[in-house]
Amino acid sequence: MRRFSLNQWTTKRWTVAEAVDGCVRHGVEAIGLWRQDVAAQGLDETVKLVRAAGLRVSSLCRGGFLTGPDPLANNRKAIDEAAALGASCLVMVVGGLPGVVPGEPLGAFSRDLAGARARVAEGLEALAPYAAERGVRLALEPLHPMYCADRAVLSTLGQAIDFAEPYPPEVVGVVVDSFHLWWDPDVLPQIARAGSRIASYQVCDFLVPLPADVLLGRGMMGDGVIDFAPLTRAVAEAGYDGDVEVEIFNADLWAADPETVLTTARHRYAQLIAPDLQEV
């Protein structure tokens, strides 16, 4: 259980201060933070809170959206925040088709998918040296193909590794997220290929049927269709020994008591994730 990390949005009702306190009370050693919540708490205050609690910051979410207008300034700010927090990585959700905004009706936009991916490569080329100078690891997160248009034009782990390979693994890595990758018939060999590039392993389940808002289709481990054992074994065999984040976006869980949610998450992690981390 030492490697269990609470992604803050699993208990979204909690502020940063409340989530840090919850981690301490439940014996959790690591937390994944979100930039907007850090901003609400204050960056300096958040740094003080996590350090006083002795917590590791397993990730900061999120940078990216490199296909949008003028993305570099905001991403440099995100890198600075990750450096201040000592985050293990800055999660990069790279962005969808230019002009397609998550949650908004279509207006003027581009259908040039290859061009969007080229913009991601250009953005990484500009940001990687800045991140390296500040000791921050960028972590490319491939998202399930249903998010390709509005959130991430990287849909497979293989694609993410391809975009990361021009850079040292400690500068640009990848995220293995069970929700986004469980379906991919090539995921296990790609996890092995990723090796030392794995910057984060995030777990939750894939619910069936999906809700109307597919962003909230994540479930507590064991409540959906994912077989976690082969994914977790593959990540362990690839050499990843970092924190494992439970990251769940789910309206019912967000409405529930965060204490109960965290207790359940730790129990399911102990049942479904931890044994396969230890096996290897």
Image: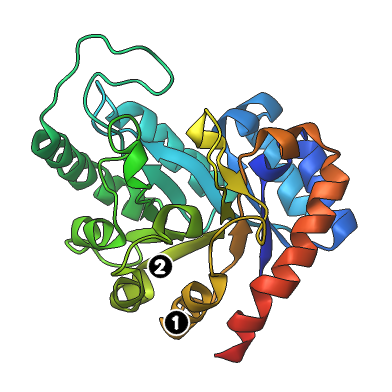
Give the residue at the far right of this rendering. 25
The three-letter amino acid code for the residue at tag 2 is Ile
Badges 2 and 1: C-beta atoms under 8 Å apart? yes
The numbered dot on residue 198 is: 2
Q: Is residue 209 left or right of residue 23?
A: left
Q: Is residue 210 visible?
A: yes
Horizontal arrangement in the rendering, residue 73 relative to residue 165 (left or right):
right
Q: Quadrant of residue 242?
A: bottom right
Q: Amino acid at mark 1?
A: Gly
Mark 1, residue position: 239
> Residue at (42%, 42%) from the top-left corner?
79
In this rendered view, identify the residue nearer to me: 154 or 133: 154
Is 122 situated above or below 141? Answer: above
Q: Residues within 10 Å of mark 2 (few under 14, many from 20)?
A: many
Residue 249 in the image: state x and y as whole percent: 61, 40
SS category of the residue bearing label 2: strand
Estimate the spatial distance between the alpha carbons at disc 2 and disc 1, rounded to whole Å. 9 Å
